Amino acid sequence: MAAAAVLKVENVRVLRGGRLQHTALWVVDGKVTDPQARFWRALDDASFAAHAVVDGGGGIVAPGFIDLQLNGGFGHDFSNPRLAPEHVLEVAQRLVATGVTAFCPTLVSSSADVYRTLADKFPRTADAHTRRAANMLGLHLEGPFINKARKGAHNERHLLAPSHGLRSLEQRYGAVLDAAAIVTLAPELDGAMDAIAALQRRGVVVSAGHSLASIDVAMQAAERGVSMLTHVFNAMGQFHHRDPGLIGLLGLHPARPYYGLILDGLHSHRTSARIIQSCHPDGLVLVTDAMAGLGLPPGEYELAGERVDVRPRGAFLAGTDVLAGSVVTMDSCVRTLIEYTGCSVETALEAATLHPARVLGIAGRKGTLDFGADADFVLLDDQLRVQRTYIAGELVYDATM
C-alpha cells in the first residue's frame, strides 16, 4: 500500500471553531487531520514528517467558499440548452481563483424541454480537483414555481403553480429534479405546501423566494419544510410591521431560516445588510447569483434566453433597470460584508463557508476545517484576497502563477 500523502501548511491562522487560531493545517490523503493524534501513531520522526510543507506567509487559512446560487459565468449560462460539458468545466475551473471550492449550479425558470436537455450536464462531483476545478454539490432550481408579480428577470411564459404538488414538479423538471439540492418556489401558490413537504421528505432544501407570501403563509411553509429564503429582500414582498411576509420568518424562534444575501452593491443597501445580519447572523449565507457576464467585460450576455446588459455597476435585463443576477465574486462578497456590517473576519468567512454547508447538511465534511473534514481550503492575505486555493489537499489555484 502506498504511503499517505501528507501536507503541512504553516505560518498561518486557521479558521476553526469560529476563531482564527495560530496553528498549522495538516492534511492526509485529502482530509484535515489531527497532528497530535498522528504524532502518537507515528513510528518515528520520518513517518510523522510532512511530504510537503507550505509557508503561508502569515495569512489566513479558511474553508473553501461554497456558492449556493450561481447561474453561470465566464460567458456561459447554465440555463442555455446549448450548454456543453466543457462550458460547465470552464466555469468550475475559473471559480477557484475566487476561493470557491464547491457550488450549486442554478437553473432559472425554463420549459420542460430545456430541463430535459440539461438533465445530465451537472453531475454531483467529488473529484474535480483532478481537473483543477470546483466541485458541484447538486442543482439549485430557481423557479418556475414562483409568483408572476415577483418574477424579476424570469420569463413569465415559463411560470406556473405546482397545483398537483410533487407531480407538477416532476412533470416540469423531469430528471433534473433528481439532481436538485435546492428548489426555490413561492409558498403562496396553489399546491406549493404539498410540494414543500414532498421535497423536504426527499432531502431537498426548500427555499422561499420570488414570492408575495404573507407572514401566515410563510409560517405555514416553514412548518412544512422551508428552511431558507432566496436572495433576501429581492423579489419578495416588502417588510411591513403588521405583515412582515417572508422576512418575518427571521423573527421565529428557534426555527429561523437561513437566507441568501447578494452583496454586489445593488441587490441590498448597506444599511439593509447591517439590519439583516444583526437580526440573524448565524443564518446569513453569502451568494453571488452570478450570471454569464461574471469575469468578463461589460456587454450583452444571456440568462435563460433573455438578453442581459452587463454595465459597470451590474447586470440588468436589456433596456431596463430590472436586475438579472450579478457579476460579483464570492471573495468580494466576504469583504463587502465586513465593510457594510462591521462584523469580524471570522463571521464573514463563515457566511461563505460553514453556513452554506449547514444549509445542505454537509457541515461535517465541507465548510469547516475540523479534523476529518475534506481539505478544501483557501489561503487569504490580510485584505482577504485569494492567494491559493486547495481542494482535497491539492493546489488548484495559485495567484502567483
Image: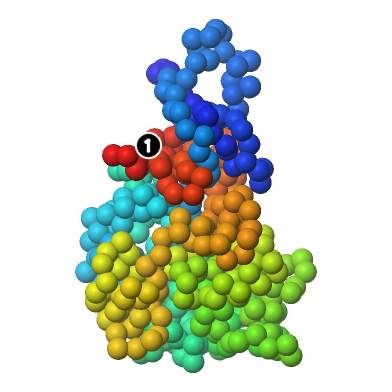
Q: Residue at x 69, y 79 (%)?
A: 248
User: Dot 1: within a 10 Å radius of its alpha carbon, few (fewer than 14), some, or many (20 or more) residues?
Assistant: some
Left or right of 301 in this view: 17: right
Of 266 and 189, the residue lying toward us: 266
Q: Residue at x 58, y 56 (%)?
A: 348
Left or right of 170 in this view: 274: right
Q: Which residue is mark 1?
A: 395
Q: Residue at x 53, y 9 (%)?
A: 45
Left or right of 381 in this view: 95: left
As drawn, 120 above or below 396: below
**Amino acid, disc 1:** Leu
Residue placed furthest toward the right? 253
Q: Position of residue 328 (x, y in %)?
A: 40, 65
Q: Quadrant of residue 81?
A: bottom left
Q: Position of residue 324 (x, y in %)?
A: 38, 78
Q: Residue at x 24, y 76 (%)?
A: 300
Of 112 and 25, the residue lying toward us: 25
Of 25 and 11, the residue lying toward us: 11
